[in-house]
């Protein structure tokens, strides 16, 4: 906002001020002398060189009593918040007239936030599958699309395209597979292992390989052990670990590894606990986390364990909060693991490998047993299919793991500091607690008039406030923001 003084006189010269402070304004000068006039901050030294250097606007007065316009374009001129501006006149002999009284003062609110948007973490519905399915296997293709194979004693295959939120039918597998597992090979093909083709206990050692480029299936190298509802995970070196499941000998502790270079299976160390229908993910450490399932005594499990490929050994991790048979599990981009569902379970929880702890997050919209889960390219998670008390499901849900706050500035702004520095100047408070700076797992993105802050906190119904420190952004006139505190936001 600019406070205008309608008329000022000084040193025999007469100034008339007009205009509005939007994209620009102008000062109309009517002088008794020819020369030059300058708009400068109040307090500028009264010498011609200082005046010229400090001027935010100037004009030549060609003749006495001629109206001359000094144009002020805030987007190109660094006006300063709280500054008073005055006019100096320098005649053709270099004589400097006394300054006017204040021509205008600048009370810039700065590029303040017009609004704050929040994208609350949690679940939202997405497109339904083409047909209900439970007990299938999912794998993420190299292009980010998600393949779901088998389940429900079917050999059908579907693909979810996250960019279009659409499911497409793919070529069928060679045999029906209920309770298989799937993992991606280094060349982008998908290996599907095990399962039951009839639902009558005729468990499979066989495997199949899907080629996304040709939408075709070929027979793979059989496993050493028949497995129903095992887990399969691609290790960092491209080999595939398959563990657990059920065979004619009961619930399995055994594990084996497929090497795509030699196209051979070899035995790996046994798990500490036999598991059928567990969940499994590769951690950022290179270890594999396996959780839940049903144990040898037909008991549902809360336990979890870690496989270290380097030492070919298993160690227990901390237990989940609840027992979960055939849960869905996905590793998130921040290294944590989302585990959802299971028998009679809508609940969801998160595992933090750094602290070996589990924490509840927002539950599923529906109970979902034997669904599939996979990460989306943007860090969200797709969960689809399964069944509840009403039967098999074709529904799908997407989980957003973090709270995202978007500050929308009144106009395009520029960052004054690097993004890494800015992280230390943004704070947030949860449920009225003390403000703390963003941490290493929080993220900041910036473009034009938008500052997007992603907080690494689980959605749980709390309130959050975000505080933006001073001088983080400036408008095109060089005006920095003042301290900004958003409205309280629910998530």
Image (spheres, rainbow, N blue to C red):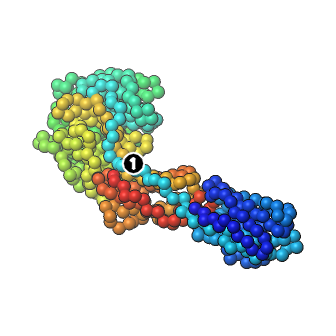
Instruction: Inspect this view and state whether residue 269 appears.
Output: no
Q: Is residue 397 left or right of residue 141?
A: left
Which residue is located at x 38 percent, y 24 percent? 170
Q: Nearer the viewer, residue 311 or 338?
A: 338
- The residue tagged 1 is 119
Mark 1: give few (<14), some (14-19) or many (20+) Cα within 10 Å: some
Residue 481's x, y, as percent? Answer: 53, 63
Residue 401 coordinates in the image, percent (x, y): 35, 48
Question: Residue 329's quadrant in the figure?
Answer: top left
Image point 17% across, 40% down: which residue? 344
Question: Residue 27 vs residue 202: left or right?
Answer: right
Q: How many marks?
A: 1
- Judging depth in this view, the residue of 475 and 292 nearest the camera is 475
The percent position of residue 31, horizontal first and vertical second, equals 80, 66
Name the residue rendered at 82%, 68% in the picture.
Answer: 32
The secondary structure type at the circle numbered 1 is: strand
49 vs 166: above or below: below
**Quadrant that contains the N terminus:** bottom right
Up/down of 274 relative to 35, above or below:
above
Task: Mark yes or no: residue 392 visible.
Answer: yes
Query: Which percent across, then down, holds residue 198?
Result: 21, 23
């Amino acid at each position: 906002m600019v406070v205008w003084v309608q008329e000022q006189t000084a040193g025999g010269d007469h100034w008339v001020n007009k205009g509005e402070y939007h994209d620009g304004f102008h000062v109309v000068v009517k002088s008794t002398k020819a020369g030059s006039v300058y708009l400068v901050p109040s307090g500028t030294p009264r010498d011609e060189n200082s005046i010229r250097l400090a001027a935010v606007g100037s004009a030549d007065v060609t003749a006495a009593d001629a109206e001359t316009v000094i144009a002020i374009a805030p987007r190109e001129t660094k006006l300063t918040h709280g500054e008073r501006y005055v006019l100096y006149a320098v005649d053709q002999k270099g004589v400097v007239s006394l300054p006017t009284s204040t021509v205008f003062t600048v009370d810039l609110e700065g590029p303040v936030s017009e609004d704050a948007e929040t994208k609350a973490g949690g679940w939202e519905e997405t497109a339904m599958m083409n047909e209900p399915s439970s007990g299938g296997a999912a794998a993420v293709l190299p292009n980010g699309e998600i393949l779901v194979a088998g389940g429900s004693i079917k050999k059908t295959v579907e693909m979810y395209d996250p960019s279009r939120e659409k499911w497409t039918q793919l070529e069928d597998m060679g045999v029906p597979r209920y309770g298989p597992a799937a993992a991606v090979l280094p060349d982008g093909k998908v290996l599907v292992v095990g399962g039951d083709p009839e639902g009558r206990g005729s468990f499979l050692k066989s495997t199949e390989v899907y080629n996304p480029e040709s939408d075709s299936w070929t027979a793979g190298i059989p496993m050493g052990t028949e497995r129903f509802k095992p887990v399969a995970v691609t290790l960092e070196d491209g080999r595939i670990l398959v563990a657990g499941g059920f065979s004619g000998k009961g619930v399995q502790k055994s594990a084996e590894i497929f090497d795509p270079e030699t196209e051979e299976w070899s035995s790996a160390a046994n798990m500490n606990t036999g598991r059928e229908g567990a969940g499994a993910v590769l951690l950022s450490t290179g270890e594999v986390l396996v959780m839940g399932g049903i144990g040898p005594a037909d008991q549902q499990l809360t336990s979890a364990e870690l496989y270290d490929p380097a030492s070919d050994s298993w160690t227990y991790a901390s237990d989940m909060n609840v027992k979960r048979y055939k849960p869905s599990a996905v590793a998130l981009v921040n290294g944590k693991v989302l585990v959802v569902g299971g028998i009679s379970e809508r609940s969801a929880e998160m595992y933090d490998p750094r602290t070996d702890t589990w924490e509840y997050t927002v539950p599923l919209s529906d109970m979902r047993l034997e669904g599939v889960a996979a990460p989306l390219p943007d860090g969200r998670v797709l969960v689809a299919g399964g069944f509840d008390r009403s039967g098999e499901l074709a529904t799908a849900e997407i989980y957003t793991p973090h709270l995202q706050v978007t500050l929308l500035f009144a106009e395009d702004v520029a960052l004054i500091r690097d993004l890494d520095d800015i992280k230390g100047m943004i704070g947030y408070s949860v449920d009225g607690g003390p403000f703390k700076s963003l941490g290493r797992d929080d993220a900041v993105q910036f473009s034009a008039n938008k500052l997007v802050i992603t907080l690494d906190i689980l959605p749980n119904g709390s309130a959050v406030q975000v505080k933006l420190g001073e001088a983080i952004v400036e408008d095109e006139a060089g005006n920095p923001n003042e301290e900004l505190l958003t409205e309280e936001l629910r998530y």
